[in-house]
Amino acid sequence: MLEILPRPQYIEQSQLNMWVDESIWGHRLYDEQTPWLCILEMLCITQSEASNGRAFVESKLNDLRYEIYPRLYLRNILFNNPHIEAVATEGLDDNERWQTWINAIANNVGGLASPDFSYLKSRFESFKDFAEIVKFLQSSAIEGDSNKRWSSKFVFPYGPDCLYEDLRVTGEKVTNDRRFFGRTGELLYLMLCRSGRGEEILSRLESTGIITQNYSVEYRGSKWNQLVLALQSPSERSVPRTSGSPPYLPYEKLLEYGKLADDWLSILRCDLPDYDSLPHIVTITGLHLIIYLLSRAKATLGEATPTQFVLEIVAPKKTTVRELASDEFQKNNNLPQRAVEYTVRSIADSPEWQACLDSYTPGEDAIDLLEERFAWSAKEESDGSGSPEDLLNSLRERAVKRHQQHLGKFHGTWSREIGLSSSRGSRRTRYAPTDSLLRTLVFASVPTRMEFQEFLSQLHQKYGFVIGDRQATDLINSGDADREDFVANAERLERRLASIGLLKRLSDACAYVQNPFASEVR
């Protein structure tokens, strides 16, 4: 059985109200943190660790501490700046525009006690140039059209000076917030650390210009990073904040870590222009974290069968494959909660629990055991008169309720975010990949070109995707579907891939999936 690392001693009992989800998946997979924001949080950590010469090196397990920047001048200019467009179009000379805007933003600024934006005037030839650059960076922002508060919006990660933390800003008061940087990026960073591929991943990220080991006052980076840097006060690089308590990832070694890193490297090795690899990195990371969520749930439940996804390649009308894809989605969606309930109930089979039942004070001893094992403050929720069985049921109910608030939504939310699931044309959600996800799968799985049936086999082996009849053998043999259902499903995928330029048919019996950005060295 896979060894689970102990709960860290630095986590005080007073800081916890329960330790159930964390014992299975770590701290934490969080549904409100989108895949893009997970990558941004992870890149912030990578840059901090690279600056200190230890990127993707975990000298001590679950002891990650890093520095992260607030960059409040940059964020106010980009996301808390409603006046800039109006000022730019007013019939004023350039000096008047600068002065009008500086006065306006000073009255609206957040998180800065004594803001001084005068440095900007010497960096741009005109206010109009400044306004155009701000408009460009706003248009390329991550999830820029969201209704998130301005302190939780993020510029595209063109380089180290684009990386900063999620904050809550109230007037001049600035506090770290875990709503959108919910620590999933920290878990991702630890997974890549433990994959054994960190050195090459760092090298590839450095070649894109996103990360550098030479970050200093003199560093300027790519032309895009320099644009962002030009908006920042000279003080922006000098005030990083040290992260709080380290994240916790329960497993030192997992096959999933290596598979995740291998797909990162496959995408980063593609000859994609500039920063075009990042959206595919986001998508493939989302897929791997969903697989991690489900595979850890199955392992907890003692289920040896690998995680499976029946994918419907969308048809004009309802098909058997659609029903099976919906059933598989619901089955997988229930897995994490089943794992939580099993984890709580399993203590009843332990010698420690039996000792509680046999003691003179079974209720009090059960409370102590549940608090020790699950960090549950049962003493605060019980008068001690309940039986051990009642306490265990109460804990199970509370653990499930807590799970349903965030981690229980992770599979559904992230499946939709990465284009793995859809409810289009149906009242039920099912696995149905988008064109964007299909492109990512080709870039991650096809070195140059691959015969179509081999590609289907590869997707089944790597991710558990059931698309064609060869992968659906068990479903066909059980009578849940006919072979023709999955043959037609695969044919629809073949046409989809051809329509987006990723498949070429050479003859009636020979079709190849092709990676148009394959590099010579993979």
Image (cartoon, rainbow, N blue to C red):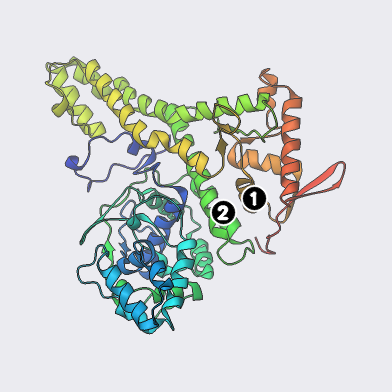
Please state which of residues 451 and 254 is positioned toward the viewer in this rendering.
Answer: 451
Please state which of residues 508 and 342 is positioned toward the viewer in this rendering.
Answer: 508
The three-letter code of the residue at mark 1 reads: Arg
- Helix, strand or loop under label 1: helix
Mark 2 closeness class: few <14, some 14–19, many ≥20 residues within 10 Å: many
Residue 255 visible, this angle: no
Where residue 244 appears, as percent x and y from the top left, is 25, 55
Identify the residue at image location x=19%, y=23%. 366
**For residue 465, above or below residue 343:** below
Q: Outermost residue, front direction? A: 91
- Helix, strand or loop under label 2: helix
Please state which of residues 162 and 334 is positioned toward the viewer in this rendering.
Answer: 162
The label on residue 439 is 1
Identify the residue at image location x=70%, y=31%. 316
The three-letter code of the residue at mark 2 reads: His
Pointer 2 with pointer 1, Cβ within 8 A: yes
**For residue 515, above or below residue 122:** above
**For residue 350, above or below residue 66:** above
Mark 1 closeness class: few <14, some 14–19, many ≥20 residues within 10 Å: some
Which quarter shows the C terminus?
Answer: bottom right
Identify the residue at image location x=34%, y=43%. 5
Task: Of the two numbered discs 2 and 1 on the same chain, state the one appearing first in sequence.
Answer: 2
Please state which of residues 481 and 110 is positioned toward the viewer in this rendering.
Answer: 110
In-image side of 120 versus 333 (left or right): left
Where residue 369 appears, as percent x and y from the top left, is 21, 28
Answer with the quarter of the image where residue 375 lies.
top left
The label on residue 280 is 2
Answer with the quarter of the image where residue 490 lies.
top right
Where residue 150 appears, as percent x and y from the top left, is 34, 57
Number of marks in picture: 2
Disc 2 to disc 1, C-alpha distance: 8 Å
Identify the residue at image location x=46%, y=77%. 129
